[in-house]
Image (tube, grey):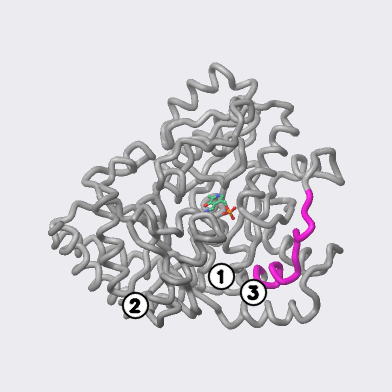
Amino acid sequence: MHRKISDRLFERACRVIPGGVNSPVRSGRSVGVRPFFVKEAKGCRIRDEDGNVYIDYVCSWGPLIAGHAPVQVVEAVMKAAAGGTSYGIPSRLEVELAEQVAALVPSMEMIRMVNSGTEAVMSAVRLARGFTGRNKVIKFNGCYHGHSDCLLVASGSGLATFGIPGSPGVPEELVQHTMSLRYNDLDVVEEAMEHMGGDVAAIVLEPVAGNMGVVPPRQGYLEGLRRICDRYGALLIFDEVITGFRVALGGAQERYGVKPDLTCLGKIIGGGLPVGAYGGRRDVMQRVAPEGDIYQAGTLSGNPIAMAAGLAMLDIVRRDGVYEELEEKASHLAAGLGRAAEEAGVPMTLNRVGSMGCGFFSRHPVTDFETAAQSDTRAYAVFFREMMERGVYLAPSQFEAFFVSLAHEKEDLDATVEAAGEAFRATAAV
Ligand code: PMP
């Protein structure tokens, strides 16, 4: 595969954009490649500027549950755009989307739209602090909640990928109230809460971690966090930016039957447009300005094009059989990948929840960031490159998820498994 045009674009990009990219992980640095530049995408396939075609398992890092450019979403976007691209004045679509989200995720009694996952979690944490009158926040190692200052501690995603513990530019004073603990371990939470429970505003987590690779919650973990929050009067915040409308129609909270006080959404709810949302208990959300005194705002929040895309996406995922189809496809893929790795003698631990999954290059169970970090990232890099050369695009980092969409057909999954067989053999030979 040659990528001459992409390479030239990357050189130009590097002169005007830091690292040539607008978000770090997509640079491909950790897996030793330069990024390709997308020309167009449809269904589960991406075509790059040089005409190479890839089966895509990044799916824009999760939002594209129906694949690229589903007709319903594209039509809704075009129709909305023709009626104006932004008003800064309320419109009907905002009400409809909020109503639909509230109906599908019952813990979200009230909802505020924002423009990204980062904004959603940042706003939910401010609200939790304002509501409880406390400052401390507990998060978990390897979970990523966007790049807002106070959550950039022992973070997953790009920080895990590049081995960065935090970031210069975040003053110590801003993170002194954030405590990051081991994921999936209730004892460390109990212990921390015994010391400082009365000062903790919120426990925030990805109910299924998706930014250290995929790590499901242990049985009883989410319930345990719920109990602890209730005991100490802290709010439980589920960051469902990835898991919302992904692991079940009602998100991880429906799948595991645990109700958070606040939920953060993003990705799917915007149908691929820049959208996030936070919401939850009415008494808490009523504290948000202008109904309450905790400030949060946004010029483009509730943008009509984004709302239209979100509504079209929810129409798709509400159809009968969607989650069964996703489950079946993802389990078919995971089984094939597992078999292919075994046949090639490559140790792999496959974690999967519904249509999000991750193959860790490790022979040990992966239950938290500490065990995820033991994966052989060099082997992953080789595997990634071999897959890319065979027309399969995976996340360019071991510490990210693969996403299966409705647009991945059985032939695509089988072609992926076949490519993986060769790629695993090449990886084993290195
Ligand atoms: N929370 C989670 C769980 C995420 O996966 C992400 C992004 N990958 C974010 C928050 C931040 O969202 P955004 O990139 O839209 O700011």
Camera-side residue of 234 and 124: 124
Q: Secondary structure at mark 1?
A: helix
On screen, residue 332 versus residue 363, left or right, reads right
Three-letter code for the amino acid on which mark 1 is drawn:
Val
> CB of residue at label 2: within 8 Å of ligand 1?
no
Crowding near the residue tagged with mark 2, few <14, some 14–19, many ≥20 C-alpha atoms within 10 Å: some
Rounded to the nearest angstrom, the CA distance separating label 3 from label 1 is: 9 Å
Provide the residue span drawn in magenta.
Answer: 297-310
Q: Secondary structure at mark 3?
A: helix
Tell me if I can see residue 99 in this picture. Answer: yes
Three-letter code for the amino acid on which mark 2 is drawn:
Asp
Give the residue displayed 46% in from the left and 65% down from the top: 11
In the rendered image of this protein, does residue 152 appear above or below residue 334?
A: above
* Disc 3: which residue: 312
- Front of the two marks 3 and 1: 3
Q: Which quarter of the image is occupied by the C terminus?
A: bottom left
Give the residue displayed 50% in from the left and 65% down from the top: 60
* Disc 1: which residue: 317
Q: Are marks 1 and 2 in contact (CB under 8 Å)?
A: no
Give the residue displayed 75% in from the left and 59% down from the top: 301
On screen, residue 230 versus residue 220, left or right, reads right
Q: Are marks 3 and 1 in contact (CB under 8 Å)?
A: no
